[in-house]
Amino acid sequence: MRVTADLDLCQGHAMCVVEAPDVFAYDKAENKVRVLDERPDESRRAAVLDAVRYCPTGALSLDDGTENTA
Ligand code: SF4
């Protein structure tokens, strides 16, 4: 899976950081999310999905890797 953040939508609520602090960080200077791990381990799926779901601005998305990444 691949995690992406649309920084135009992100308003720095940092809900994602609460859900998955190993995947998302809050950049205080920018007041935006920073994706620490764009390809988290499958074991983190539930937490990442919660982060995507609870982001108030819909800035996060999860791509299931069906695209050709080779
Ligand atoms: S929860 Fe959404 S709006 Fe808040 S920091 Fe994360 S991506 Fe940005």
Image (cartoon, rainbow, N blue to C red):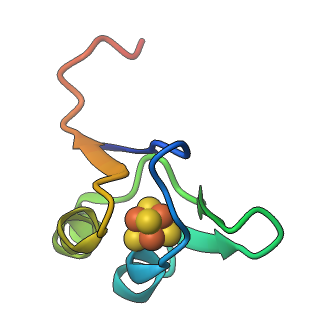
Is residue 23 at all visible to an observer of this figure?
A: no
Task: State which quadrant residue 67 falls in.
Answer: top left
Relative horizontal placement of residue 44, taking residue 34 as reference (left or right)? left
Q: Quadrant of the N terminus?
A: top left
Report ligand 1 position as a quadrant.
bottom left
**What residue is drawn where x is 52% and y is 64%?**
11
Relative horizontal placement of residue 28, taking residue 17 as reference (left or right)? right
Residue 40 picture location, percent across and down: 39, 57
Residue farthest along the bottom direction in this orientation: 18
Q: Is 66 placed above or below 17 here?
A: above
Q: Is 30 placed above or below 68 here?
A: below
Residue farthest along the right direction in this orientation: 29
Task: State which quadrant residue 69 falls in.
Answer: top left
Residue 68 picture location, percent across and down: 30, 11
Relative horizontal placement of residue 15, taking residue 29 as reference (left or right)? left
Q: Is 56 placed above or below 68 here?
A: below
Q: Quadrant of the C terminus?
A: top left
Residue 25 picture location, percent across and down: 60, 72
Residue 50 picture location, percent across and down: 19, 74
**What residue is drawn where x is 49% and y is 79%?**
14
Task: State which quadrant residue 15 falls in.
Answer: bottom left
Front position in the image: 43 or 47: 47
Is residue 37 at all visible to an observer of this figure?
A: yes
Q: Is 37 placed above or below 53 here?
A: above
**What residue is drawn where x is 42% and y is 88%?**
18
Report the label total: 0
Front position in the image: 4 or 42: 4
